[in-house]
Image: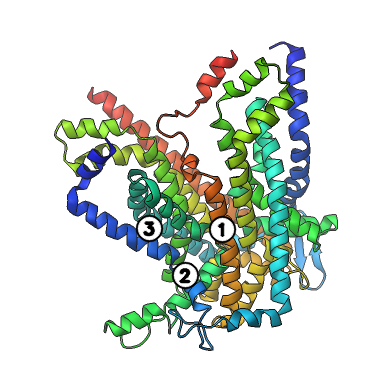
Amino acid sequence: MARQTSEGVAGPLGRLILHVYILGAAIFLVAPVVAITAGSLTTTQYVVFPPRGLTLEWYLRMFDRPEMLSSFALSLGIAATAATIAAVVGLVAALAMVRHPSPLNRLLWLLVVSPMMLPSVVLGFAFLQAYTHMGFGSTVAGLLAGHVVLVTPYAVALILTGLKSLDPTLELAARSLGANPGRALRRVTLPLILWSVAAGWGLAFLVSFGDAAVSVFLNTPEMVTLPVRIFDALRYSPLNPELTAISSGLVIVTLAVLVASASVVRFERLFGGRAGEPAKTPKNQEGRRA
Amino acid sequence: MNPGRARHELGRWLRLALLPAALFAVIYAWPMVQILRGSLNGFDPIAGIVPALKPDFYVKFLTDSYYLGVLWRTVRLSLMVTVVAAIAGYPISYFLVRSRGRLRLLLIIVLLVPLVTSPVVVAYGWLVLLGSKGIVNMALIALGVTDEPIKMIYTAFTLVIGLVQVLAAFMVLSIAASLQSLDWNLVLAARSLGAGGWRAFGAIILPLSLPGVATGCLLVFSLSMSAYAVPALIAGPQVKVMSELIYEQTMALLNWPFAGCMSIILLLSTTGLLAAVGVLGRWQRARQIAAAAAEA
């Protein structure tokens, strides 16, 4: 059925044009990332794409720049910790929202999801001002707290998707077979939504790992996350190949996490109900409860 | 539901949600409230922040043509990014929904790459590609389009291109979500009644996917209004936007009250514009329905 309509809408010429357009768009979307990764292999003293010659010299030079490596380690640590806190908070908040209908859920949603809708520069400024008043403005705790707020909405959104697409009768079946609520949650619900928790963790990690707008406010001269380190260096010497090497390090970690989550998550699920598996509408859940 | 049961429900809700809610009240809600309070303080270059309750900085922002110019530029550029992303993204969403298997997965990953890669690195990539020695200028010279490299970085044009590339995924995935849930039997019905391909598209597919386009526009517009790293790196001081002003006031001039005031103005102008467009859209729809009812 799908085939028939897709051929019909624009005819064979239209299909050809669409395919060429998609190819062009895909090149456009990955071009800057490819330019940095490939450009880091150049033998010239300035970055150029396509690279001239191939060398790993710039990657080796990175080991002479301990501040770059410590920024890399700091960013990995902050991202992993913030993503883990976000996944736990996200799971608990999503369970509260889906399982326990309460007028307070609106407030909870406002608290944990709305940061996604605010400009990160505004968040960064607000955190700097308030955390300084509270006495942890320029500490690791402040940086971590800022990142937790920044990334939790993504974890909540993905875990909510997972919980809502779950058939509630499965847990009811477990309960009717004698499992208590905790056991039903652990043995039935959690394994079934694990993919969404993993996806939420991955996305939260990536947002934190790549963030510059919040970190730029919460960093101190001794504590600089990797994107901010690159950002500052770029303003002085944009075409230094050493920077491309450290940037490709960042890209490699990003792609590794992306591909790892892709193997856990079928991305199609993020679009909601698939053919043959209708999405559970709130209406029929309410019907069951009543 | 009897009161005892309700109290039990509330207890279970609290057991789950109390800790996250309390944590976010401290590390998120409180700082946001503080912006509003702080923006009413005064500032002295030597003494620093002077506690006060005066809207002086709001008056200063709204009467100074320089600041208003930056706000207007931010709005204008964000609108351009939104329109370009909607038009350029629509065919990609269409293709995404109609294709299957590995090709589809590959396209989704291609879309996610600019989204999950640090905006700093992406902006750096554009600097390399579009610089005077970049591949784009080399190609233009080789083709004889131009003799000298064209200055592309540090312009508003490049900023729009860069933001479209970074934010395209939000638009494409929103439109794809609404195309996915569209009832394609309607298209078949229109075709079997003799509608041409483009007619079926214009009469059925496009109108039914407009909610997805609206969601995408909302996301892309608000993210463009607040983008920081991409404008700062590829547009530089020549094309200054609101987020750079806020950063400058906070970190370089240490004028936190004014930075807070600009944060509030940025928030209000973004949400205000979106709300206005929403109201306009609802009014338009109500008018169409009334017109259709009158015809019948």
Q: Amino acid at mark 3?
A: Val
Which residue is the site of mark 2? A34
Q: Amino acid at mark 2?
A: Val
The percent coordinates of residue B242 (x first, y second) are 57, 63
The percent coordinates of residue A61 (x first, y second) are 64, 83
Q: Are marks 3 and 2 on the same chain?
A: no
Tell me, yes or no, whether the two marked residues, 1 and 3, touch with CB atoms within 8 Å.
no
CA distance for labels 1 and 2: 26 Å
Residue at the image position 72 percent from the left and 59 percent from the top: A78
Which residue is more in the foreground, B14 or A88? A88
Image quadrant in which you'd find residue B182: top left
Dot 1 or dot 3: first in sequence order is: 3
Task: Specify the subunit that label 2 lies on.
Answer: A
Task: Specify the subunit that label 3 lies on.
Answer: B
Q: Nearer the viewer, mark 3 or mark 2?
A: 2
| A190 relative position to B181: left or right | right
Which residue is the site of mark 3? B84
Q: Are marks 1 and 2 on the same chain?
A: no
Task: Specify the subunit that label 1 lies on.
Answer: B
Which residue is the site of mark 1? B226
Which residue is more in the foreground, B189 or A61? A61
Q: Indicate the secondary structure of the residue bearing disc 2.
A: helix
The residue at the far left in this view is B194
The percent coordinates of residue A245 (x first, y second) are 58, 76
Tell me, yes or no, whether the two marked residues, 1 and 2, touch with CB atoms within 8 Å.
no
The residue at the far right in this view is A135
| A180 relative position to A173: left or right | right
| B139 relative position to A285: left or right | left
